[in-house]
Image (cartoon, rainbow, N blue to C red):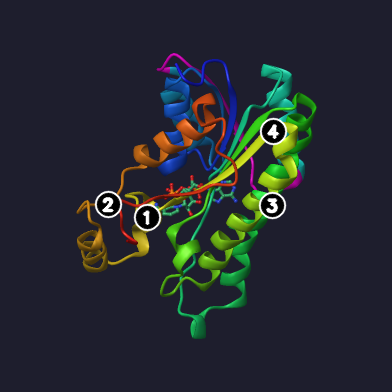
Amino acid sequence: MRLQDKVAIITGAGRGIGQATAVKFATEGAKVVVCDLSPEWIEETVRMCKETRGDAMGYAADVRDIKSLEGMVAATVARWGRVDCLVNNAGIVADAQMKNMSEDQFDSVIEINLKGVFNCTKAVVNTMLAQQSGVILNASSIVGLHGNFGQTNYAASKFGVIGMVKTWARELGRKGIRANAVCPGFIATTILGTIPEKVLRALEDKVPLGRLGKPEEIANTFAWLASDEASYINGAVIEVSGGLTI
Ligand code: NAP
């Protein structure tokens, strides 16, 4: 198993890509901290992880709340002694065309998708520095690379994540810590719920593979990046989109 006994914190792990990532990590032997807002979703993911050969514990934390994130890292270290991997996955959308986008819509997306990634990494980095090892994985998006109609806030947040990843790859590489970003294309989760069915079908048609991605296909990428097989991959921005942008 590729992640045997590695300890991983995954944010937004109650559903979607985060849930699939938690289950994949556990299947690969990891001990997973399932972080999300909703206790019911957390419980469900923990249950799914425990059905594999791995182990899991839940922790309800908002990525906007640095104190509760510090509590989560302390609880992780108390239980399993270390943190080998952080997957910054929690994210939201609040779409509107630029001319209609409110300050609240802009701020809420930046606060979770960008500042939340900073907060979680800040909460975990001293533990990784003390270990002289760790992997910080981050959910960006093809929208962070190319922009998207109605997503000024989301594009800014996901482009910002790439900037932070490249900075951390430089700052932390010599301390044994790798940082990478994954840019999913359109993946079938509830986050796509606001996109009209007709638009989704049109998007699907544009994908050379002819379909939306599955959460498990992003989870597999995170699992590989977290493993020692990816030991020389640092500061990378990996698109997983079925070829949508070629
Ligand atoms: P999702 O199904 O909506 O799941 C997102 C998870 O994040 C939810 O469980 C949500 O909890 C949690 N979350 C939201 N705000 C949070 C906060 N403040 N603190 C802690 N957890 C919070 O989304 P997804 O499609 O799996 O997306 C996962 C990541 O991939 C996101 O960063 C997204 O931007 C990125 N991504 C997705 C796609 C796609 O097509 N699906 C494409 C590119 C990038 P609640 O349910 O309780 O709100």
Q: Which residue is mark 3?
A: 167
| Tag in front: 4 or 1 | 1
Find residue 212 and name its label. 2
For the residues marked 4 and 2, what is the alpha-carbon distance in whole angstroms?
33 Å
Q: Quadrant of residue 56?
A: top right
Q: Is residue 54 left or right of residue 122?
A: left
From this viewpoint, is residue 64 visible?
A: no
Q: Are marks 2 and 1 in contact (CB under 8 Å)?
A: yes
Amino acid type assigned to the residue bearing label 4 in the image:
Met
Rendered position, 77 above or below 245: above
For image coordinates 42% across by 42% down, the residue present is 17
Say whether mark 2 is within 8 Å of ligand 1: yes
Sequence-wise, which precedes: disc 2 or disc 1? 1
Q: Would you say residue 57 sits in the magenta stretch?
A: yes
User: Comparing marks 3 and 1, which lies closer to the viewer?
Assistant: 3
Residue under the point 54% across and 36% down: 39
Q: Earlier in the sequence, mark 2 or mark 3?
A: 3
Q: Which residue is mark 4?
A: 72
The reply, left or right, for residue 125 in relation to residue 9 is right
Type of amino acid under label 3: Thr
Mark toward the start of the polypeptide (3 vs 1): 3
Q: Residues within 10 Å of mark 4 (few under 14, many from 20)?
A: many
